[in-house]
Image (cartoon, coloured by chain):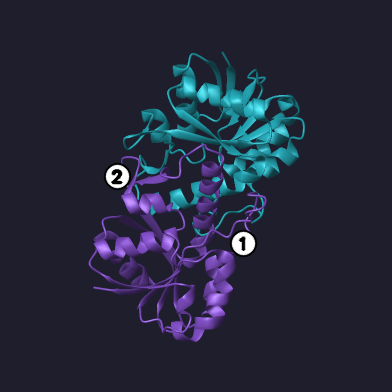
Chain colours: A cyan, B purple
Amino acid sequence: MAHLSIIGTGNMGQAIAAVAGRGGHTVQLLGQSDAATTVTGDIVVLAVPYPAVSAVIAERGESLAGKVVVDITNPLNFETFDSLTVAADGSATAEIAAALPQSRVLKAFNTNFAGTLAAGKVGDLDTTVLIAGDDVDAKRDLAGVVTSGGLEAIDAGSLARAREVESIGFLQITLAAGEKVSWTGGFGVVAA
Amino acid sequence: MAHLSIIGTGNMGQAIAAVAGRGGHTVQLLGQSDAATTVTGDIVVLAVPYPAVSAVIAERGESLAGKVVVDITNPLNFETFDSLTVAADGSATAEIAAALPQSRVLKAFNTNFAGTLAAGKVGDLDTTVLIAGDDVDAKRDLAGVVTSGGLEAIDAGSLARAREVESIGFLQITLAAGEKVSWTGGFGVVAA
């Protein structure tokens, strides 16, 4: 059983907390009024929008040493919906990993709309969480939380693949915003 | 009814030809021995690997003026499977559009494995072709070919989105090569 801390109480934070709860894991859900509360999870999900990540790291970075830190962000320029705000050859996850060198940083959940985490389905497909990162044990632990909560998980590769996973999240958001796909649909993964 | 020329007789070229044929369109399929044959299609699919595109453009570029040109490539470094070979903020499609300023260049089919074009299915989902480009009429014409051939088509946005569409193709190939998904599966699109 894992113990998670989820920083951020928006629809993604709540949906991820529910997945972990369904899997029998314990969750510490931390909102903006909990700044003084110590993070207790072994897996810490940064369930805040990308522009808020740097403040979380500034406040809590030292306490995240040794922990698995999960970046779920889609660093879009939400004014134009036409670009990401991170370096073209980088990713939000790479930035976070550089800022938290003592943490085991993963990318996950950014290609999952909150509704598909809650329902466990993308259309008729089981919802699949893509997990990228360099720490194989950390990826396995997070995948265990995801699958015990009724979803599928796929190891999407190294931390470098966060760039491509963020591209998928970006395109999926533009398709939903443009009503080409619904917010309960999008990209599903067919494994077999 | 459209008339397509497909340059390249590999499994992708053949699969795209079959889709067009199912839709009642006519196809000129051109192989390496057809270098002297004039391209007659209004829609020209460059169904060759990325490293072969520049030679096709050098040989046939002038004859492609005014035509819809469809880039299907995934410009991976196939030695490392760890990067694309195009600029991080660009795409193969952007390069081709720059080389063919008088053509109407689209990205399409690169997120579809040949088997999913032939079957019309990704698992239980209808196969969806993502089409990116700046020419709305060209995208509509290609989407018409795709949908008349029994597949789904989604307008994935401007030519700039080819970058993200290539990232999806890249990640999907690494997942299939790593046996995380099958070559008849991968990313499907759930619209509703």
Residue B65 lies, with reference to residue A160, above or below; the image says: below
The percent coordinates of residue B5 (x first, y second) are 38, 74
Q: Label 1: how many residues lie within 10 Å, few (<14), some (14-19) or many (20+)? A: few
Q: Label 2: how many residues lie within 10 Å, few (<14), some (14-19) or many (20+)? A: few
Within the image, what quadrant is residue A183 found in? Answer: top left
Quarter of the image containing the C terminus of chain A? top left
Q: Does label 1 lie on the same chain as label 2? A: yes
Residue A126 appears left or right of A72 = left
Residue shown at 47% from the left, 52% from the top:
A171
Q: Residue B171 versus residue A28: which sits nearer the camera?
A: B171
Q: Residue B108 versus residue A96: which sits nearer the camera?
A: B108
Q: Going from the N terminus, do you reach mark 2 or mark 1 first?
A: 1
Residue shown at 68% from the left, 31% from the top:
A135
Q: Residue A36 versus residue B85: which sits nearer the camera?
A: B85
Q: Residue B180 versus residue B171: which sits nearer the camera?
A: B180
Within the image, what quadrant is residue B143 found in? Answer: bottom left
In terms of secondary structure, where does tag 1 sit?
loop
Determine the chain carrying the residue at label 2.
B
Residue A37 lies, with reference to residue A178, above or below; the image says: above
Residue on which the image places disc 1: B89
Three-letter code, disc 1: Asp
The percent coordinates of residue A181 (x first, y second) are 35, 49
Residue on which the image places disc 2: B192
